[in-house]
Structures are given as structure tokens and as C-alpha cells.
Image: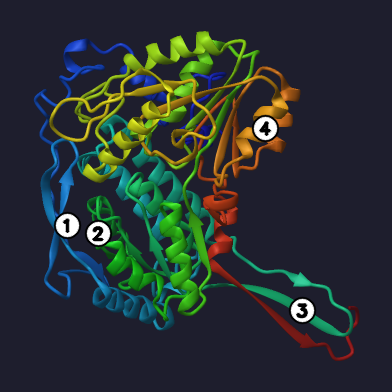
Amino acid sequence: MAARRLSSVLSRSLSLSPPLGSLSLLRSLGSSVSGNSITRFSTAAAAEELITPPVEITYTKNIINGHFVDAASGKTFPTYDPRTGEVIAHVAEGDAEDINLAVAAAREAFDEGPWPKMSAYVRTFLHLERSRILLRFADLVEKHNDEIAALETWDNGKPYEQAAKAEIPMLARLFRYYAGWADKIHGLTVPADGNYHVQTLHEPIGVAGQIIPWNFPLLMFAWKVGPALACGNTIVLKTAEQTPLTALYVGKLFHEAGLPPGVLNIVSGFGPTAGAALASHMDVDKLAFTGSTNTGKVVLELAARSNLKPVTLELGGKSPFIVCEDADIDHAVELAHFALFFNQGQCCCAGSRTYVHERIYDEFIEKAKARAVNRTVGDPFKKGIEQGPQIDSEQFAKVLGYIKSGVESNATLECGGDRLGSKGYFIQPTVFSNVQDDMLIAQDEIFGPVQSILKFKEIDEVIRRANTTRYGLAAGVFTKNIDTANTLTRALRAGTVWVNCFDVFDAAIPFGGYKMSGIGREKGIYSLNNYLQVKAVVTPLKKPAWV
């Protein structure tokens, strides 16, 4: 139990001290740092001297059949530093031809290679078993923690402390978790009418295609690769074009750990080319995608139009965060702030509709505004920084467009509302009050540091309003009353409901959404079902002693 609490990355509990190594420590990391090393809510963020990332760019080619290779076309594309908009490196640009090569390697590794035939746990004279390779990989991740975290921050813009002290340790934790499942995947003996012996076999599904997003590149890598490998599958993974560097780095570590060639193939490229080719490939047996709802629809259609491959989708959200009238306002403000602004607001389950009871609404607004104004923004490599830049120019412009929409809709702009500085993709922490349900900022997934605070009067009313959305990924409830908590958790149509905490993401906790937030669940025991086929085997019994 202690180990599991330590690994509850992204957790935010107000009833317990923040566990070491989790993202719940982020607030304490920056709470006592001197002002000369942090840029708070001011235009100095983009003018400050930036820290040179303490890591070299080593791997920029695709990984196919155990080798780093150039794109078949010879093309490359730039990946950018969101702090400046400048090029970090040029990466091999995979397209349909590279996907074909990667799928062929994965197919050969599955049909003829050792991985699916490998013992789940016991060492043989021919090879290491699956679980030990996953465990060895986790050890290598820990050994290279700082380099991996630096790459993640450089390519993505998230605070280095968040990456190094929470996300990369959680990456190792997730693979140790799935290593533990490798020898526990089994079927059942099933009683049936008549003289028959019936058993079920749980078999690896085959070649899995996986497409990961840019907001949590390595955590999403783990959520998909971990269960797929534990079940004995082979993989073709496409990185997000904005953040290809860390997947390529840890792909090399996997082969150091003893993963056979062709089992994990990684292709960097763009959605309309490499992503579409993977989703529509006739020799891919399973597809998993994390990203926007609109892109998820395209992925699902491509999978259906090709070979009707099963698809797991983890998509967008517009999660309600409900603060009841009995709340400790200071704690509720801090929790609501974390729920929205964490990871620059670039989180699919962000608490982006903050519903506050009318009796405490005005006080909540003032304190939420003060907390946002005091949020530390700047170079994510600097100690104590809570918020770095948005991922790229497109997302930067999108967020500013939603802020403009909020102002034009007559929501009250309490603070923020503009870019921060003149270089890079920094945005001021922004808070809107007097937000109405029909405003775009209350309906659409903004994916940025924009908090929309709405007022409610009755529990039944807020349930109805919270559920009036096309999304259903997550929700937060803040109350001291257990009956109120029970009412809300059962009534809210969301895949996860956090009560008096938010963003608790242990390896064992399933995650996924209702409605247009996705199909299926990732993490925990439920994720194994995504990568297994169930086969029934029926055999006649001749003169059985019992049936």
C-alpha cells in the first residue's frame, strides 16, 4: 500500500500530506522559492535568461525492427522548444511507407519471433521472460531519470520538477505494475451442459497500433505499451509530431533491456500521413489512440473502413469541479486551481468547469483570482516554476482565441487574458467569473490555463448542468458531507470522479470516459482486456467420472 501511495502521480489530496515523488508535491516545490529565480504573473517570463537543457539530442531516427533508421523518403521535420519557438532538432518524418515497414517487422516478430511464446516469468535457456525485460526497462528508466525528464521538458514545456520527480518515476512504476501482470493472464474452466470439457484461453491480440499525444508523451507511452507487451503483443507506435524525442530515447532503453527486435517499433510523423496509415492498415490487429475527440472520430472511421480492428479511444473532456457550500474555501480554491492549471491546462481531464455554490461564490472568486495572479510562470527548467509555455503556436493561438470569446460573451475577466512576454508560447493564468453554461469557454475543451467559474444553487441543478455536455471523462467533488459526495459520485456521468482530491493516477486505477470522451479503459486490470482475445475450447468427454 505504501508503494502504491508513493506512485500516485498527479495526486492532489487535501486530507493527507503530499506523497513524495507525486505531482501533488508541485505546489510545495514552488511555495518558498525566492522571487529572483521565478517569474510570477509578469511579462518578464519571456525576457528572462533561459537555462540550457542539460541533455544532448542523441536519437532522432525511427526505430524499426530493433534499429534506428532514416525515414524511407529521407525527409525530416523540426521539433521545437516551446520556450522560444526555435528548432531543437530535426527528426525522421515517417509516412505510409515507414508504417508498412514497421508493421511488417511487428508482424514477423509476433508470428515468428520469441516474444508471444516467451514464458511470462520463468527464465529458460533460450531467452529472458517478458516480466524481467519489463522490470529491467524500469530500472534503466530510473537510471536515466534526469536525462529523460530534461528531454520531456525541452520538447514539451512542462516544468522539469514535474517531469523528474513525478512523471518519469511513474513511468517506471507503470512498467513494474504491468511486469507483475505478465504471469497472471489466464483463462477459465467453464462448466457446460453435457459431457464436455470447456476452457477459455486469453491470447495476445497480435500487432497493436498505438498513437500517443503530446501533453503527457511518456505517461501515455506507458499506458499503452505496458499492457500490450505484458500480454505478449508486438507494437507499432506513432509519436505526436510535437514531442517525438522521449519515446525514441526510451525505445533505445527497451532494447538495452533485452526486448527482441520488431516487438516495439516507433515511427515519428504526422497524423494525416503516418497516423492515418497506421489506423487504416490491414495487418494491424488492434488500435489505441489518445487525442482530441474530432481526431478520434477519424481514427475510428479509418479502423472500421479497413479491417474493422477494435479501437480504444481516450479523448477530450470538459470536466466539472463542484465546490459545495460546506467546503473549506481555501482548500477548495487550491484544489480547483491545481485541477485546471496543472500541466499548463493541457490535460484532458482538467477541472475546466468550476461550479461553486452561490453562498461562497464571491469569496471563492477573490481567492481564485489571487491564487492565479501568484502562479509562478517562466522557464520550466527553473526551480519552483509551476507553469511553462503552451506546446506550440497553434495551441497558443487557440487558447487566446477562447479567452477572446469569453470576453466577447460577457464573462468577467478577473485576471490574465493575454500572452506573457513576447517570446515563446507563455500565457497569463486566466480566470473568468460569471460564466454561463452556453458560453464556448464552458462548452469546449480549451486545453490551456483558463479557469471558468460558474455559480449554482441546488445539488440537483448542478448535477443536471454538469452532465449537460458531450464529454464524460472526469469530475471533481469538494464537500465535507458523505451523503452529498455519494449522491454526486453516482449521478455524474464520468469515467472518474475524484472526491476531495484531483488527478490521482495510480497504475492500478482505470481511466477512460463516458460519451464522446472515449471508448474503453486504460491502466489497471481493465487495460489488459484491450490487448487480449478470448478463445473458447470445447472437448468431448468420454465416460467422465464427473461433469
Cβ atoms under marks 3 and 4 closer than 8 Å: no
Q: Label 3, label 1: how many angstroms apart (C-alpha)?
A: 50 Å
Cβ atoms under marks 4 and 1 closer than 8 Å: no
Cβ atoms under marks 1 and 2 closer than 8 Å: yes
Query: In what quadrant of the picture does the N terminus appear?
Result: top right
- Residue 270 placement (x, y as % from top left): 26, 62
Labelled disc at residue 252: 2
Q: Earlier in the sequence, mark 4 or mark 2?
A: 2
Is residue 229 visible to us here?
Answer: no
Q: Earlier in the sequence, mark 3 or mark 2?
A: 3
In the rendered structure, which amino acid carries the disc numbered 3? Val
Q: Label 1, label 2: how many angstroms apart (C-alpha)?
A: 8 Å
In the rendered structure, which amino acid carries the disc numbered 1? Tyr
Q: Nearer the viewer, residue 116 or 327?
A: 327
Which marked residue is nearer to the observer: mark 3 or mark 4?
A: 4
Q: Which residue is mark 1?
A: 59
Please state if 65 lies on the left or on the right of 24 as rendered.
Answer: left
Please state if 303 lies on the left or on the right of 474 as rendered.
Answer: left
Q: Which residue is mark 3?
A: 198
In the rendered structure, which amino acid carries the disc numbered 2? Lys
| Vertical relation: 128 (above or below) 154 | below
Q: Which residue is mark 4?
A: 463
Q: Label 3, label 4: how many angstroms apart (C-alpha)?
A: 46 Å
